[in-house]
Image: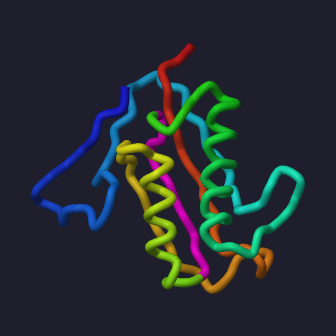
Amino acid sequence: MLKTIETADAPKPLSQYAQGIEVAPGSRIVHVSGQVGVTVTGEIPTDVARQHQLAWDNALAVLAAAGMDHTHIVDGHVYITDRAHLGIYREARDRMLKGHKPAATLLVVAGLADERLVVEVDLVAAAPAA
C-alpha cells in the first residue's frame, strides 16, 4: 500500500526517514493537524521530553481514531523551538515509529503559538480504502 522510494541520485536521509513514499491509488488519506505536547486536560508540562512524547501520543491518537497506526504514516512535519532539542525529537520519533520510515521534514522555528510549547507534530497517513 505504501511504497518506499529510495535513489542513489539524491543524498541519503540524515536520520530515520525515507527519501519518498508512494501511496497506492484509491487509498484513504488522513491529514493530522499539528499536535502539541499538551495533555487531554490541557496541562503543558515543562519537561521537553514529556512534551515530545505527548505530541506524538496525540498525533497517533488522531490516527487511531481514523483506524490507522504508525505504519500508515506517509509524511510528517515536526516543528521544534530549539536546535538543542533535536536529539530528544529523534529519540521520540524513533520510539513512536518503531522502525517505520515515512518521508519527513524537520523545521526549527523561533516559537509556537504558546511560548510554553516546544514541539508540534503534524502527519499525513494513508490506508487502503474501506
- Viewer-closest of 42 and 129: 42
Q: Where is residue 2 in the image (x, y as percent from the top left)?
A: 36, 32
Counting from the top left corner in percent of width and height, residue 116 is at: 77, 78
Question: Quarter-wise, where is residue 74 in the image?
Answer: top left
Q: In which quarter of the image is the C terminus?
A: top right
Q: Is residue 74 located in the magenta-colored stretch of the structure?
A: yes
Q: How is the image coloured?
A: rainbow
Residue shown at 28% from the left, 67% from the top: 14
Does 58 lie within the magenta span?
A: no
In the displayed structure image, the side of residue 103 where residue 67 appears, left or right: right
Give the left or right position of residue 88, taking residue 113 as reference: left
Picture quadrant where residue 114 is located: bottom right
Q: Is residue 86 depicted above or below 42 in this figure?
A: below
- Quadrant position of the N terminus in the picture: top left
Query: Which residues make up the magenta segment?
Result: 72-81
Q: Quick check: 79 left or right of 91?
A: right
Where is residue 119? Give x, y as percent. 63, 69
Q: Main secondary structure of the magenta part?
A: strand
